[in-house]
Amino acid sequence: MKILMPQFACRLATEEGRLLTETFISPSREECRKHFESKGFCVLSVKKDWKKIEISLSQLSRKVRDKDFILFNQELMYLLRAGYPVLKSLEIIMSRTRNRNLLEVLLRVADGVRSGKNLSEAFAALGDRFPAVYKAALQAGEQSGGLAQPLGRYLEYARNIEKTKSRVRRALVYPSLLLILSFSLLMVLINFILPRFSGFYADFDADLPGVTRFLVGFSLVIRRAMPFFALGLLLLTAAYFLLGRKEANRVWLDRLKLGLPYARRIWLDTGTALFARTLGLLVQAGIPLLPAVRLACQAIPNRHLFRMTAAVPEDIRNGQSLSDSLARCGFFPGLALDMIRIGETSANLEGMLAETAEVYDDSVQARVDTFVSLIEPVLIIVMGILVAVMLLSVYLPIFNIITVTR
């Protein structure tokens, strides 16, 4: 499959008479020509760059990185505040964009705006590559007559979520490295060290210690089972991704995740924080509560929990309060429900939703930090035991051999 927007090689002439060759991704030759003519160049020729057109569609269909998308929206907000029209702002940003995926997206969005669509409609035409809450924030800004303020609120929302994700990732880096190192050490012991020493010990008539015999036998079993273990791991990984393609299977897998003792609380707190933060953003942007709740429920990452919120919009439509509707789901914590109830009665729902999100973001971070603080010493102890067992299994037979030779 080929790239949807081809790349063109353009020969240009400046006002001073210098000749340039530039490449540019564009939906057509005409759009490419207009792009360079708007910058004051004289376009001599426009040809498709066949050397760079063979790019897989799967690569281009990947979502734009969160950091790149946040930076794009930040630039767009500043340009809109400065009074630039939407299309002109997009063209300015595109002229500086080097990220290929983001440039592909902006070209399609600009083409949609140029054809008469609103910015929210142009992003909606891209499907699920961007969160629904972003498109809803844009739509609310267009209805209110100004995009800069909703973009500012979305940027704050996106930065908070990215900050939480980064903190969790940083907390898990060290124990992950320890786990990989422990596994690598075990593999080196089983596949390289013990087989060499077992051949060396076989030349002597000394009895091997029990720990050495055990490890030699264990390494033999592991080496024989390694191809089957690798094949089983590959099949399990393939099955996981294949099952994840269907919605029913994703719900079943996410329900299994909730069965893990320590992870369950983390999933629940994460879902509560994302729901509250998303709903707060949408309510603050002026979106009515009913469609805002539908979008906020979609922000819950666990599909099983998302299914449990299916009746919330209908309950609100029938006259129930938001807090009572959420209470019927059965998984929102009591503190979150109380805070939302206070926000409803005090006419400060968006403020209390933001407070709720902060409380449960901090709760998730505290639980992750606790897990890391518990797992780190356990992994260090395991590594120490592995090293000790390896040294004993290698050096004890040497002492026996020295005794026999004497």
Image (tube, grey):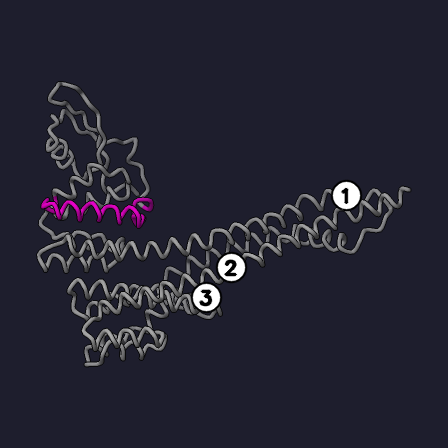
Residue extent of the magenta highlight = 58-87
Q: Which disc number belongs to residue 373?
A: 2
**In this rendering, position of residue 317 left or right of residue 402:** left
Question: Which circle's residue, 3 or 2, is located before the other in the chain?
Answer: 3
Vertical placement of 74 versus 315: above or below? above
Marks 3 and 2: which is nearer the front? 2
Q: Position of residue 73 (x, y in %)?
A: 22, 49
How far is the residue under mark 1 from the one under mark 2? 42 Å
Is 18 within the magenta? no
Marks 1 and 2: which is nearer the front? 2
**In this rendering, position of residue 93 left or right of residue 373:** left
Callout 1 touching callout 2 (CB < 8 Å): no
**In this rendering, position of residue 113 left or right of residue 345:** left
Vertical placement of 338 versus 191: above or below? below
Q: Label 1's element?
A: helix
Q: Position of residue 337 (x, y in %)?
A: 30, 76
Vertical placement of 107 versus 379: above or below? above
Q: Label 3's element?
A: helix
Residue linked to disc 3: 263
Callout 3 touching callout 1 (CB < 8 Å): no
Q: Is residue 358 visible?
A: yes
Going by the numbered disc 3, the residue's amino acid type is: Ala
Residue linked to disc 1: 199
